[in-house]
Image (cartoon, rainbow, N blue to C red):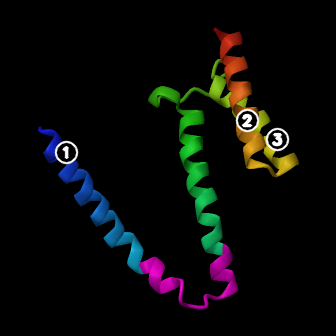
């Protein structure tokens, strides 16, 4: 594959992505949606993030590891507590990273 071919693919994928995503956003942004629907749509990003994170926490490396030797799980639990108490996504992410590094170092 040449560099030119790769760049053409990147540009075409970007155009296809834009063509699929932009029209619904443009149409829905002009409509007044009912409040329950607006609240429901607002929960989708958190649900998607939760699903992505849960897969990595419970299945690091593609296999279930629900033991005390799973640094992802051991770091995720206090990270969830930090978020619950502070409601700060940035604070929870920083706490989670520090906890993960510390727990990984301890588990060796």
Left or right of 80 in this view: 38: left
Residue 2 x/y as whole percent: 12, 39
1 or 3: tag closer to the N-terminus? 1
Callout 2 environment at 10 Å: few (<14), some (14 to 19), or many (20+)? some
User: Please, is residue 34 above or below residue 20 in the view?
Assistant: below
Tell me what residue is drawn at x 48 percent, y 28 percent: 63
Q: Nearer the viewer, mark 1 or mark 3?
A: 1
C-alpha gap between disc 1 and disc 3: 44 Å
User: Please, is residue 30 above or below residue 88 in the view?
Assistant: below
Tell me if residue 30 is in the magenta stretch. yes
The secondary structure that most of the magenta stretch takes on is helix
Q: Which residue is mark 2?
A: 94
Callout 1 environment at 10 Å: few (<14), some (14 to 19), or many (20+)? few
- Stretch of the chain drawn in magenta: 24-39
Label 1, secondary structure: give it.
helix
Which residue is more in the foreground, 3 or 69?
3
Q: Which residue is mark 1?
A: 6
Left or right of 66 in this view: 84: right
Q: Which residue is mark 3?
A: 81
């Amino acid at each position: 594959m040449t560099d030119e071919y790769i760049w053409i693919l990147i540009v075409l994928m970007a155009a296809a992505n834009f063509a699929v995503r932009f029209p619904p956003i443009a149409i829905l942004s002009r409509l007044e949606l009912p409040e329950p629907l607006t609240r429901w749509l607002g929960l989708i990003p958190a649900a998607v993030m939760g699903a992505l994170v849960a897969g990595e926490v419970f299945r690091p490396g593609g296999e279930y590891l629900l033991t005390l030797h799973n640094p992802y799980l051991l770091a995720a639990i206090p990270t969830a507590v930090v978020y619950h108490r502070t409601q700060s996504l940035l604070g929870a992410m920083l706490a989670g990273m520090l906890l993960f590094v510390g727990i990984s170092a301890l588990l060796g």
